[in-house]
Image: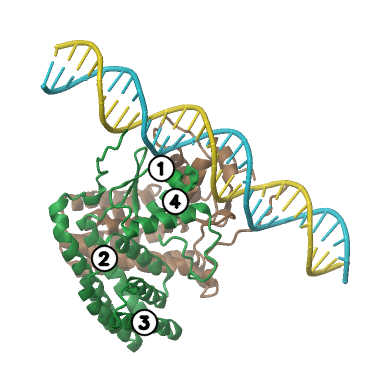
Chain colours: A brown, B green, C yellow, D cyan
Amino acid sequence: MARDSRTAGKRLGEQHDSLHNLIYQEIRSAIADGRLKPGERLVEERLAEEYGVSRNPIREAIRALHADGLVDVSSRRGAHVAGLAPDTVREIIEIRALLESHNARLAARNRNAVLLKNAEAILTRGRTALTSGRRRGLRELNEQFHRALAEAGRNQLLSDMLESLRTRSALLFSPDDPARQEVSWQEHAGILQAIVDGDEELAAKRAMAHVLGAGEAHLQSTGAAATAAGARDSAGELPQKKQERR
Amino acid sequence: MARDSRTAGKRLGEQHDSLHNLIYQEIRSAIADGRLKPGERLVEERLAEEYGVSRNPIREAIRALHADGLVDVSSRRGAHVAGLAPDTVREIIEIRALLESHNARLAARNRNAVLLKNAEAILTRGRTALTSGRRRGLRELNEQFHRALAEAGRNQLLSDMLESLRTRSALLFSPDDPARQEVSWQEHAGILQAIVDGDEELAAKRAMAHVLGAGEAHLQSTGAAATAAGARDSAGELPQKKQERR
DNA sequence: CCGCTGCACATTGTAGACAGTGAGCGAGCT
DNA sequence: AGCTCGCTCACTGTCTACAATGTGCAGCGG
């Protein structure tokens, strides 16, 4: 399969971090970078050899990825990179919209000065990055902004759930459309403004619109309407019958 | 996240019971039954011996429990049964209220005949069990009813998230107050009625009230003692310095 | 030519060791 | 005494080996 062993810049640094954590990160970014595509099988022994470790850390990493919803694991049949069926994407968007909305409401209710300052700082950085054309960091800044908002909501559970949803979508969605980015950061500003003003309703409304808008954009760019309700439970779990036996 | 209760619901054939799955179930019910108390340490080797297996299945089970939020795992310091700090309980209630509410709205929007019939059947069983004094099955019936509602919402992700939240609370909350049960099942009826009537707003409102009400009841019963015993915000997450060295 | 049956193997599940680390406990110092 | 510094050891993290099982393929019968 020659997965370009070079791409996996496996520098097992000094890190006292447990091995399986590093593996987890590695595979995770491999999925994010598209080096591992949805449906692709994750063979423990192969990965073990690739990273120069035994199968145990690999197994743990895979379990962690499974907990994050990034891989599907079926008993005795191995693990596959999870895919997102259009229906699932819609569900994620819907729930994320609901939760982001609620979180924005909470943030507007609390109005914690320092946390909002932090969000504003990130917002500024995002907007300058946008105008100066440096788009490479935008994805990360977007992540940071939403994380800052989540913190401002001061509900740990909600924050965690949002993080999880963002992870699932961010890793599996297609890269962002530049045009959309403009709108996106304007909306960010609008949300934050409403929060700072303490206008709960407006903040909630804008947050929801933001998520739904971004979701629409993604649905457009990716599969389009090519899959109304047909795929149903396929959920990207097609094992991709590659057959690489020798 | 909702273990592997794949969409199919748990008809016959509970999967090929891999050992670690059995262990998972075992420990899980041990927590539910109170045989394992919050803060208690889970020593892999001890459990391995207790169940007559090696440590690997134990580790996997612990990971799964961790994914469900039932145990806390800190690197190199072992796993402990998770506790619920009062703040966390409030967060769970709040988010669950939000999600149950939304789910009820969706159910009212869809009005899937067969799924609602199912919910009604469970409702009936619950009410008869209540009046006939057989309270031992009520907890399970309550679980089933909410699961049925979740299905009726027809949003898999939402259903899974609710399942997870219910799991976390059900296992760690104190047993239910009989008086509350009466009210609870009346509210169940009210919610379902609104859904059947297709009144989205009412259904959402009632679902939220139901969760908040139940939550309040729990906070009352546990909160008082909890405030005295472990007023700290860390509540159950202190590793419980027992020191059982020999 | 095509479907069925049984075999062989690729992979996962489990077991049993070894290695590394953090936490108490006591010796030595001040 | 109080404190620091090692020592010791119960653990977890990892590795290697073995067992169990699903899958594809060859070979056979139709």
- The residue lying toward the viewer, choosing from A146 and B170, is B170
**Marker disc for residue B192:** none
- Sooner in the amino-acid sequence: mark 1 or mark 4: 1
- Sooner in the amino-acid sequence: mark 2 or mark 1: 1
Measure the C-alpha gap from mark 2 to mark 4: 25 Å
Q: Which residue is mark 3?
A: B125
Up-down relation of residue B201 to residue A69 (above or below): below
- Sooner in the amino-acid sequence: mark 1 or mark 3: 1
Look at discs 2 and 4 and give the one toward the viewer.
2
Q: Which residue is mark 2?
A: B175
Chain on which label 2 sits: B
Look at discs 1 and 3 and give the one toward the viewer.
1
Chain on which label 1 sits: B
Q: Which residue is mark 1?
A: B46
Q: Residue at x 18, y 64 (%)?
A: B221
* 2 and 4 marks in contact (CB < 8 Å): no
Measure the C-alpha gap from mark 2 to mark 1: 29 Å
Measure the C-alpha gap from mark 3 to mark 4: 34 Å
Tell me where residue A25 appears, x and y as whole percent: 44, 44
Identify which amino acid the numbered label 2 is placed on: Pro
Tell me where residue D5 appears, x and y as whole percent: 26, 17
- Sooner in the amino-acid sequence: mark 2 or mark 4: 4
Tell me where residue B177 appears, x and y as whole percent: 22, 70
Label 1: element kind: helix
